Image: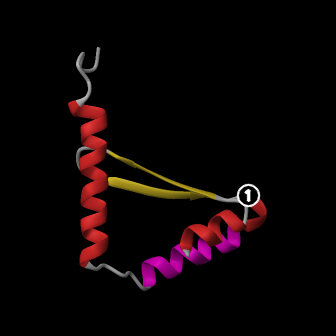
C-alpha cells in the first residue's frame, strides 16, 4: 500500500545497501512534501517489525552482496 500511495502522488521509492546499513527513501514532488513527511512520521511512530519483513530484507541484502561484491571480478579498480 505504501508504494501505491507514493507513486499515486508522483513520488518514487528506492533504497541502497552498504556493509553496515540499508537506507530507504522516497522522492516526492514539492507539492506533496506534507504527505511525504506525514507518511514518514507515521511509519516511525508505528513501526511494524515482523519475521516476514526481516526475512525479506535479509534476502535483499544478500542479493545486493551477490550483485555488488561476489560478482565483481576486478574488485574496485
**Residue, far bottom:** 46
Residue lying furthest right in this view? 31
Q: Position of residue 50 (x, y in %)?
A: 28, 80
Q: Tell me if residue 67 comes above or below residue 53 in the rendering.
A: above
Tell which of 19 and 14 is nearer to you: 14
Most foreground residue, 19 or 9: 9
Is residue 21 something one can see in this rendering? no
- Range covered by the magenta-colored residues: 33-45
Q: Is residue 40 magenta?
A: yes
Which residue was labeled with disc 1? 29
Q: Position of residue 40 (x, y in %)?
A: 53, 73
Q: Please report the residue visible at 44 percent of the width from the left and 77 percent of the height from the top.
A: 44
Indicate the quadrant where residue 45 lies.
Answer: bottom left
Color theme of the render: secondary structure
Helix or strand or loop: what does disc 1 sit on?
Answer: loop
Q: Around disc 1, counting alpha carbons within 10 Å, would you say few (fewer than 14), some (14 to 19), or many (20 or more)?
A: few
* Left or right: 19 in relation to 15: left
Which quadrant holds residue 53? bottom left
Rendering coords of residue 54 (x, y %): 26, 69
User: Which residue lies at the image location 60% right of the left edge and 77% below the top edge?
Assistant: 38
- Assign the C terminus to one quadrant of the image: top left
Q: Quick one: 20 or 69, which is closer to the camera?
A: 69
Q: Is residue 77 magenta?
A: no
Q: From this view, report whether residue 4 is shown above or below residue 57.
A: below
Left or right of residue 26: residue 46: left
Amino acid at each position: 500500500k505504501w508504494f501505491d500511495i507514493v507513486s499515486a502522488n508522483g513520488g518514487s521509492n528506492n533504497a541502497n545497501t552498504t556493509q553496515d546499513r540499508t537506507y530507504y527513501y522516497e522522492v516526492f514532488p514539492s507539492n506533496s512534501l506534507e504527505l511525504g513527511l506525514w507518511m514518514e512520521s507515521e511509519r516511525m511512530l508505528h513501526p511494524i517489525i515482523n519475521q516476514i519483513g526481516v526475512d525479506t530484507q535479509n534476502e535483499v541484502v544478500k542479493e545486493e552482496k551477490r550483485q555488488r561484491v561476489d560478482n565483481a571480478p576486478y574488485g574496485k579498480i
